[in-house]
Image: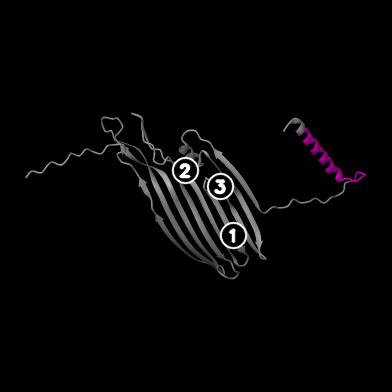
Amino acid sequence: MSVPCKFLVLVCAGIFAAAAVRAGETTDGKAVTTATEEAPEYKNWIELGIGGVITSGDRAQFEQEHRLPGDQPYGGIQDLHFEGPLGKDGLFSVDGHAIWDTNDYDIQVQLSKPKLGYIKAGFTEFRSWYDGNGGFFPHNDVFFPPPIPEMHIDRGDAWVELGLRVPDWPEITIRYEHEFRQGQKDSTSWGDTNLTGLAVNPTRKIIPSFRDIDETRDIFSFEASKTIGNTDVLLGMRYEHNENDDALNMERGAGQLPPVVPPPMPSSI
């Protein structure tokens, strides 16, 4: 904005301020009370955002250190809230955020009714990045590039919960939850090679390795509580089932030729 425009805005603001002061005065200089309008209270909102990073150098190391994707845009809904009546006294609400390309998601939906109960469900997911590079042997500048330079693991949780809140009844809560962890990450259990240029004990472990991660967990829980006089009675149950299908990917003797095996000798008769 140029200087004349700034001056014009200040002048207009001064005129409107003076007009507001005069509106509260009468011709004889006596002040009168005027009704002021209250600002409306907003119950629903949404905030959007977008960003990006340009890297120079080791992009995988940047992503691991800063927990952001390199050389690509990301963005979406930073914050969201919506609520509205349902029936006479019911309430429906949605809260969450969703950022693409960082896999940062969190949403919760709830339906509640006083003196009856509620049902709510949600989903959460976030991503962690890993650098797949291995070791470097400076004696003869030996370096083996990783099979997957930029790795990541997505961790998430999906759940649903029902609650019964009827007066004079036990409070009952039923919940089901599904957790997961999937992707690849680097491993410090490196593979070996003897292509180091050393005459004695040439084998060194500098070959990058990585792990395939595929893990799930299912949880079911039940709770019931009731207050009888001065005593709280609580009954609970929890069932959990895990499945892990992980694997370590390691290369042994990288770059080496297979050992020479002499041909079999002809059998004598």
Q: Earlier in the sequence, mark 3 or mark 1?
A: 3
> On the image, numbered disc 2 is attached to which residue?
129
Residue kind at label 1, given as amino acid type: Gln
Q: Nearer the viewer, mark 3 or mark 2?
A: 3
> Is residue 62 rendered to the left or right of residue 136?
right
Q: Is any atom of residue 232 visible in this view? A: no
First along the sequence among labels 3 and 2: 3
In space, the residues marked 1 and 2 are separated at their CA atoms by 32 Å
Q: Amino acid at mark 3?
A: Ile
Q: Residue 165's spot in the image, x, y percent? A: 58, 66
* 119 in the magenta segment: no
Report if the CB atoms under discs 1 and 2 are less than 8 Å apart.
no
- The vertical placement of 57 against 44, above or below, is above
Disc 2: CA contacts within 10 A as few (<14), some (14-19) or many (>=20): many
Residue picked out by circle 1: 110
Q: Nearer the viewer, mark 3 or mark 1?
A: 3
Q: State the mark number for residue 100.
A: none
How far is the residue under mark 3 from the one under mark 1?
21 Å
Residue 260 spot, x, y in % from top left: 21, 38
Q: Residue drawn 63% across and 55% down?
A: 82
Magenta stretch: helix, strand or loop mostly:
helix
Residue for point 57% across, 41% down: 51
Residue 261, quarter of the rendered image: top left
Q: Dot 3: few (<14), some (14–19), or many (≥20) neighbours within 10 Å? A: some
Q: Quadrant of the N terminus?
A: top right
Work out whether 250 lies above or below 161. Answer: above
Report the residue marked by disc 3: 99
Q: Nearer the viewer, residue 73 or 18?
A: 73
The range drawn in magenta is 6-30
Q: Earlier in the sequence, mark 1 or mark 2?
A: 1
Check disc 1: other Cα within 10 Å, few if <14, some if 14-19, many if 20+.
Answer: some
Q: Amino acid at mark 2?
A: Trp
